[in-house]
Amino acid sequence: MIAVIKSTATESQIKNLIGWFEKQGVRVNESKGEFCTVLGLIGDTTGIDIDLLSGLDIIENVTRISDPFKKANRKFHPEDTIVDIGGVKIGGGNFAVIAGPCSVESEEQIVETAKAVKAAGATLLRGGAFKPRTSPYDFQGLKEEGLKLLIKAREATGLPIVTEIMGADQLHLFEDIDCLQVGARNMQNFELLKALGKSGKPVLLKRGIAATMKELLMSAEYIMAEGNENVILCERGIRTYETYTRNTFDLSAIPMLKELTHLPIVADPSHATGKASLIKPMSMASVASGADGLEIEVHPNPSKALSDGAQSLTPAQFEDVSAAIARIRAAL
Amino acid sequence: MIAVIKSTATESQIKNLIGWFEKQGVRVNESKGEFCTVLGLIGDTTGIDIDLLSGLDIIENVTRISDPFKKANRKFHPEDTIVDIGGVKIGGGNFAVIAGPCSVESEEQIVETAKAVKAAGATLLRGGAFKPRTSPYDFQGLKEEGLKLLIKAREATGLPIVTEIMGADQLHLFEDIDCLQVGARNMQNFELLKALGKSGKPVLLKRGIAATMKELLMSAEYIMAEGNENVILCERGIRTYETYTRNTFDLSAIPMLKELTHLPIVADPSHATGKASLIKPMSMASVASGADGLEIEVHPNPSKALSDGAQSLTPAQFEDVSAAIARIRAAL
Amino acid sequence: MIAVIKSTATESQIKNLIGWFEKQGVRVNESKGEFCTVLGLIGDTTGIDIDLLSGLDIIENVTRISDPFKKANRKFHPEDTIVDIGGVKIGGGNFAVIAGPCSVESEEQIVETAKAVKAAGATLLRGGAFKPRTSPYDFQGLKEEGLKLLIKAREATGLPIVTEIMGADQLHLFEDIDCLQVGARNMQNFELLKALGKSGKPVLLKRGIAATMKELLMSAEYIMAEGNENVILCERGIRTYETYTRNTFDLSAIPMLKELTHLPIVADPSHATGKASLIKPMSMASVASGADGLEIEVHPNPSKALSDGAQSLTPAQFEDVSAAIARIRAAL
Amino acid sequence: MIAVIKSTATESQIKNLIGWFEKQGVRVNESKGEFCTVLGLIGDTTGIDIDLLSGLDIIENVTRISDPFKKANRKFHPEDTIVDIGGVKIGGGNFAVIAGPCSVESEEQIVETAKAVKAAGATLLRGGAFKPRTSPYDFQGLKEEGLKLLIKAREATGLPIVTEIMGADQLHLFEDIDCLQVGARNMQNFELLKALGKSGKPVLLKRGIAATMKELLMSAEYIMAEGNENVILCERGIRTYETYTRNTFDLSAIPMLKELTHLPIVADPSHATGKASLIKPMSMASVASGADGLEIEVHPNPSKALSDGAQSLTPAQFEDVSAAIARIRAAL
């Protein structure tokens, strides 16, 4: 970490500051320039609060040189992490396709979809039992009942389950679930992250609505700091001013994160774009960019008005996407 | 709500869709144009999922005409809501100044600051006991012990307390706290919002890191839908690409929200700008724009290197801000 | 276009408004609801100013149903446009690779690079003679001299030239240039767009720093409205709050724009990411997403400290990217 | 400027880089740490391209310590600049109110409005003759004829004129205009900025659609580097994801820019919010935050359907705003 001190700072102010740094356990290398003094902080600076420092009157500017994440950092852990979800591996060359409906609606719906997506190449089943909704008046999911139906679908197909948890106090309900998803709105629900860290279960951590990659990695670090290294990151689009797509799919985040971390990274083109017609090209692009997997919404029953053409694909469309992904994977 | 149907939709697809709307309890007014068919939905459409609709193949475009928030909506509740926090009123012409340190550090620190801010015009005391931090390695607050120290400071000064809660399972610890703050990162932690709704306690709800005003109001609605109308909104800056300030202070949100809702709205120039030197002008601007109150960080001990000039003001600087605010309030 | 009128509007205000619409040549379909009146505007509404309308007191909300671009619209021109740049075709299945240095520096540099990129598979040569720089103190390019050196490089290799123009009054200098590039900062320099429209020359139009896709298409429309249909769009990243990459590469814009328009679309991973290490994966992803071409910075002389590893690739790295692109193209 | 070199860099790579810096005329202070080498660059680094540097393979991170703007920098020019627009001063305690219609429509319209805004307290007249429009099919202004009508309005009232110029080749038409406005879309039209720099005329430079404050100051620097110090900055809102207001009014930019530069700064609440009802509170807030002036749209003829309640105020509403501004100014 480098702190640039303003030319207006007095000697005693600088001394005080250096003393404070040393109390935090970091060594300080002082170098005086014409217009400013530069302090180089050496040692473990992860505990130094950069926002607090930046706000000091005598500080011109603070820059963190080393990344503030440690356990997630590829520098200290060069090999790819491989996460095992109920026997299905992801990361380190293992590619996973997580597919299923947005919400679990009924036993028939989820079992039928599970069979269809398995036949079309999915390796994991997704489906929402607890649904975070912007409005309290929108459907909030089947909750516990939904979890039970997911387990039935797993029994029928053998596909391990990925489903969302919304609070630390729900953890006991998820004991028989293979992988717990943290939604974008909860990416910085630190109480939930700590609880998941203690659980030891595989976690699929979605990037926050407007989170930076660094914040995503720091949230992974919360889980890992409790001893759980089974974390999978997910790029699902970020908020911008563009309106033709629901979010802006930050696909560069896939290869960028692969440089920064050893954790597996999947892409979610369904939420990132919000448009069924973009899922196929963006799934192919995700694979070409180096993603370790995909999460795709598939809805079973194209006869209902509402399922026809929503951001979910039909099973037949999903099969077409699966084949396209396979062609790209073969070309890599 | 208005749904525009693509010219490529078949008669039977449109019929199906209309049938589905009617099952949701809304009446549909169909009007055929040259290039498209327009469906006007009449009745209570708050339960209709606009994202789902927008994703349908046959839909060109969906627009919600009426705002999706009801209890927070000024249209249905024209008079200003006045919230009572331990005897201090806010809203409907009652102006509150919430001041205190970022974190509670010790009994001496919090009691001393409480006395200083009271003397300088504060009407409520703030101070963090549970601290949401991006990094798991940063100081997380004194927790329960911090809450006890806040109560001591209240005993010493009579100032009611505003402090942050981070999870639904902490609620029992906050029984003797006057107003519970929901931080920006938890604005869409719906499990927490519902628990606060049931608690009936005054809630200070901060706008999310990159939340729209509509999302802020929908989160207020989550609390109100459980029967708790004691909600105060807080504008604290939103995330953009500008870097001279920590966030972009969306001050227009104050008068805009006052049109949309009857709830009181306060501004937090400390977090919105991240710069001590901007707090005075932006506090004055907040008052001039119509805010019902301010939340300002004040730190007691200017002799410590780290408190000197951080985003916190010293008590003396806060007194200067208080006087400036009073001049603007007199001019309104 | 649909205008929703507030319930507080009087009959005579609505009448006035309808009269005004009819004077603009559009027919109006009025439908009264419980809470509002909805006006459907039928006919050519491209001339109606949506911002002006939205600002009216009596208007709740205005939505444009049909896209405001006509000549660029795929609805009215379903076949892909193919642009011919000095004999090299792009669009409609023709894939182009535009490569070369950021700036033209010397005859040796540009000729050498042109030969190297041609050998590695480039079909068009890029190189900046006029350079838009944020700071007036930064290098502004070799200007006219740079254009002459580009022509020498074309003579040596046969590669047609793509280079940036910064103002309408420079047009006479570009007579012998094959394709004129409009930079991100000039995407809404309407005087320049109109002049390029009159010139009839192929134009490579880069998306603005923070432009929406609709604005990009409207800027293409400015060129096309003057009779020049030789427009190629370019996605080069947009501004967000993410800092690991220089911009956020909005790759979904490639398939989204291909739905909306018949114009060819290329991707520029060099500017979109600002990182040499991301160019290969994001070039592959661009091709997989359906791009009609790529624009990639290549710098010839890896022995200079400054060229080594900048956002430019070396010729050898570019050759590797070319091979990877070819593999993806074969898989499509 | 501080450059942090990766631990993987070789001695000879670092030597090369230092040699290159020295050729650019800056001295280099090298300091080796455990994990990296830090180079402090001393002297005039305004010519060093930070983007180019950041992209180098051996560079971890580059930070500019001193601001890249010189002539606009308050550090080197502590006193406020006062700009004289046809006898009306702005800056250094002189407050200006620039008012008038969005577009000049007719002699009657502009003369009538000029008289009305003068009576209500405006000191400068605004009105668009050349109009930048997103769509080529929208009204583009009366052009030369509009400039003549503005001059007539000045003759009738004595109010100096502020109006927009869109290209360097229009400059000869603006000889008799008092202050030339550069619109948000042209903030980085560098050819135009240089031409205005040479003209010596007062320039009102609006912040770009999504420009940072630093970019705004660098664009001012383009004008000033040509010898013209008569530059007034204007905050007019920036692009974000919020939709209730047209832009997000970054009001903190007013006091922040006043710290960074000596140039006068005005606020434009009309464009920043896009809502007539927000202009009064945000004008008051702008004044309270320290603005040197306001630019407000006023339209004369409330009987036309379209002028009634647009983002423009009526003369009577403007009078009310003027009185409110005066109260806030008195309180400062």
Image (cartoon, coloured by chain):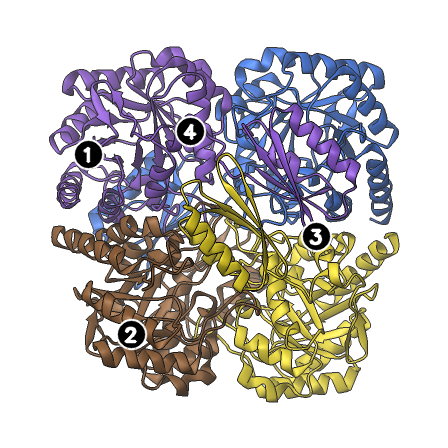
Chain colours: A blue, B purple, C yellow, D brown
Residue occupied by mark 2: D111
Question: Mark 2 and mark 3: span between their CA atoms?
Answer: 43 Å
Distance (Cα) linking label 3 and label 4: 52 Å
Q: Which residue is mark 1?
A: B301
Q: Secondary structure at mark 3?
A: loop
Which quadrant of the view contains residue C236? bottom right
What amino acid is at disc 4?
Answer: Pro
Q: Element under label 4?
A: loop
Disc with the residue nearer the chain's start (3 vs 1): 3
Depth-wise, is mark 1 or mark 2 nearer the camera? 2
Q: Which residue is mark 4?
A: B132
Q: Amino acid at mark 1?
A: Asn
* Secondary structure of residue under mark 2: helix
- At 52% from the left and 28% from the top, the residue drawn is A135
Tell me which chain the residue with mark 2 is part of.
Answer: D
The answer to whether D252 is drawn above or below residue C265 in the figure is above
Q: Residue at x 17, y 66 (%)?
A: D94
Specify the subunit that label 1 lies on. Answer: B
Q: Residues within 10 Å of mark 4 (few under 14, many from 20)?
A: many
